[in-house]
Amino acid sequence: MTSDNRTFPADFLWGAATASYQIEGAVAEDGRGPSIWDTFSHTPGRTVNGDTGDVADDHYHRVAEDVALMAKLGLKAYRFSTAWPRIQPDGRGPANQAGLDFYSRLVDELLANGIQPWVTLYHWDLPQALEDLGGWPSREVAERFAEYAEITHAALGDRVRHWITLNEPWCTAYLGYGNGHHAPGRTNGADALAAVHHLNLAHGLAVRAIRAADPGAQVGVTLNLHSLLAKTDSAADQDAVRRIDGIGNRVFLDPIFKGEFPADVARDVAGLTDLSFIQDGDLATIAAPLDFLGVNYYSRSVVSGPEDDEGFHDSHSGAWPGSDKVQFHTRGLPVTQMGWEIDAPGLTALLERVHAEYGPIPLYITENGAAYADEVGADGQVADPDRIAYYDLHLRECAQMAADGVPLRGYFAWSLMDNFEWAWGYEKRFGLVHVDYATQVRTPKASFSWYADVIRNNALITAPDTGK
Ligand code: FCB
């Protein structure tokens, strides 16, 4: 049940988010090295329409215009990511000063407009040179990440107070190395599990590096946690939930918040790996205390056990190594352009659970939003009532959670503007601002004005006009 609570705590942080490869373009400028997403998107058949991030939103050249839009929106915080290959073109060694200068200018522009910069250090654009060394399945990449974090913090830490180590390591590990839908496009379950561990380790090492340099820094991580329902209460369906929760959520949450690798997941994946990549001391490193947890939420999943009686194991690839035969079900709920079912109460279920089992820790929604096939109308406006309705539903849940004592401190809309939606290319539009990719003209959508009202009022006062 959604409630009528429509106001937010006085200090609630209102933000919007983007990521470097999705918006910057300028992939070969000022010394930036290639990333795995350059390689992947330029490989035929990997992205819809063969789209690449070569130009994207050309944000690299339009920072002032884009920050002006953020100021107009009334943002209190802007979450963006730094591109590792802009800062260390081949993932190691001395910094590329031009890359640091770009982010330094962005940070200054944000602060001049009263907007807090929230930096994500890794939103998927691994330097290609590190993939060539073995990528995330290789331990060395975790060590290199700590060095990159230190360099980036040294350049921006005098002005940036909020640091997110990783964005959605689930996607990096399982889509990048498990089912190959994301860069680098590899398909090996054991590699995906090694990547999980090295991402966790990279996180822990980066937390340590930032804290050593800056004890007052606010440091967290962003996870795309899966909000799960069992199809039925059968033992097989309950076991499907346990498995997906284990490999999708607890392989990150348990090491990070409890310093443990989940024993049941170790059993589920025993046919693929003995986890010998977890070395003595790693889990303690990974469990470094955090200041906040960022959660990205878009939809909820309904799962059940395998349809035949062969058990949960299948191939050694896929996004759910060791549990490939779990079935995912739709429920006929309304969907966004991604085909993702809209289920706002799933957000509350998820955050209440995280708070109960892993808290107390301040929580931020670091991404939430919806794609629709928006068009600029003849009147020059972009009407996006479905997106407004989506935001309204989810923000109602947020208002109620905050009132109920869940330590939800802020919300970042995904996304500030339409951008390169990874393997989906430019077809899927998530922005509050429409981008015409041929001209780079930005047009704030109706949802932009609506969200600006929410921020200004610190409340959901304007009822969504669903246009229906
Ligand atoms: C998340 C990603 C973000 C964007 C949204 C739609 O998984 O973090 O970059 O693609 O999904």
Image (tube, grey):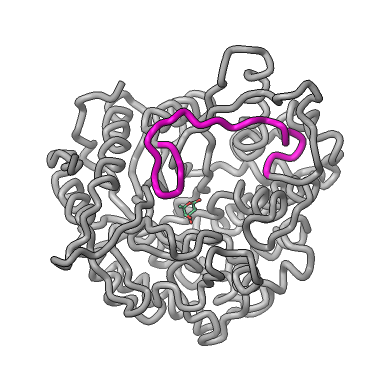
User: Where, by quadrant of the figure, is residue 349 drawn?
Assistant: top left
| Residue at the far top in the pictured view | 234
Q: Could you say where residue 321 lies in the image, as x and y percent from the top left?
A: 74, 40
Is residue 234 shown in magenta?
no
User: Where, by quadrant of the figure, is residue 426 drawn?
Assistant: bottom left
Q: How many marks?
A: 0
User: Is 106 placed above or below 117 here?
Assistant: below
Q: Nearer the viewer, residue 127 or 333?
A: 333
Q: Nearer the viewer, residue 377 or 6?
A: 377
Res 459 seen here? no
Residue at 63% in and 19% down: 237
Q: Could you say where residue 401 lies in the image, as x and y percent from the top left?
A: 33, 28
Q: Nearer the viewer, residue 330 or 302?
A: 330
Res 60 seen here? yes
Image quadrant in which the C terminus is located: top left
Tell me the chief SS of the magenta region.
Answer: loop
User: Is 400 placed above or below 338 here?
Assistant: above
Q: Image check: 316 left or right of 218?
A: right
Q: Could you say where residue 340 lies in the image, as x and y percent from the top left?
A: 45, 41
User: Is 362 placed above or below 151 here?
Assistant: above
Q: Image check: 333 left or right of 74?
A: right
Q: Nearer the viewer, residue 359 or 212?
A: 359
Residue at 77% in and 46% down: 317
Question: Range of the magenta residues?
Answer: 319-341
Residue at 67% in and 21% down: 239
Image quadrant in which the N terminus is located: top left
Q: Could you say where residue 284 lies in the image, as x and y percent from the top left?
A: 69, 41
Q: Image check: 122 left or right of 383?
A: right
Is residue 334 shown in magenta?
yes
Residue at 81% in and 25% down: 310
